[in-house]
Amino acid sequence: MTEILIAVTTWLSALVTPIPLNEQDVYCLTRNAYYEAKGDSQMSQIAVTHVVLNRMNTDGFPKKACDVVYQKNKNPHNESGVTCQFSWTCDRKLMGMLPEKEKSGWSESLRAVQEALAMYYHRRVDVTQGATYYHATYVNPGWRNVEKVTTIGSHIYYKAK
């Protein structure tokens, strides 16, 4: 009974507050969740998605999901001269490969993105508490001017100070 109530509430919320994203945006978010947090928990994939949504609502970042996911910055210290915001987007092998819906983990990533969107736009819940950056727990990027917000799964989340 509780699941039905949640489904009806989410559906009614969608009528009142539609999600301002199109099918291509959802695909980009799903692809990002898939490559950034595949094999991690659903909450990790939700958190990765919330970072993209937070960036869309933060000055200095693009306003469209796909533009945020594929954003690159100039970096003279990098061999290619650019830095990708999400590491998988710099991997030529992954960029040429489109995950298929039958591929392991794709449907889980899509469900995580759908849940992330419902949480963010309908329930006003952001599991990252406004984070616009994250990295895997096994790296130390030495970032400055950011404060740690939380750790979810294998990622540590930050927002600007």
Image (cartoon, rainbow, N blue to C red):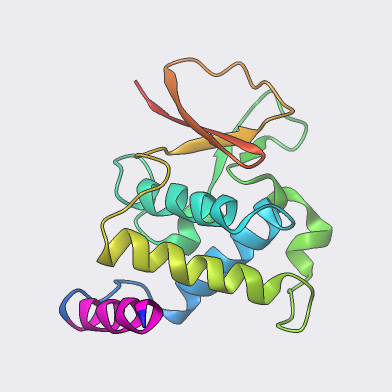
Q: Residue at x 78, y 68 (%)?
A: 96
**Residue 48 visible at all:** yes
Image location (x, y in percent) of residue 160: 37, 26
Indicate the position of residue 77 as horizontal and vertical percent values. 69, 23
Task: Give above or below for 118 relative to 129.
Answer: below
Rendering coords of residue 105 (x, y %): 73, 69
Q: Position of residue 142 (x, y in %)?
A: 61, 16
**Residue lying farthest right?**
93
Q: Quadrant of the C terminus?
A: top left
| Magenta stretch contains residue 4 | yes
Q: Main secondary structure of the magenta part?
A: helix
Question: What is the span of residues highlighted in magenta in the rendered image?
Answer: 2-15
**Residue 119 relative to residue 112: left or right:** left
Residue at the spot 61% in from the left edge and 37% down from the top edge: 155
Which residue occupies the extreme front position in the image? 1
Q: Quadrant location of residue 98?
A: bottom right
Q: Is residue 160 magenta?
A: no
Q: Is residue 28 visible?
A: no
Outermost residue, left side: 16
Up/down of 117 relative to 89, above or below: below
Which residue appears at 51% of the width and 56% of the height? 46
Residue 10 location, quadrant = bottom left
Count of numbered circles on the image: 0
The relative height of residue 117 versus residue 100 in the rendered view (above or below) is: above
Which image quadrant for residue 81?
top right
Describe residue 149's horizontal placement relative to residue 104 as left or right: left
In which quadrant is the N terminus drawn?
A: bottom left
Residue at the image position 20 percent from the left and 84 percent from the top: 15
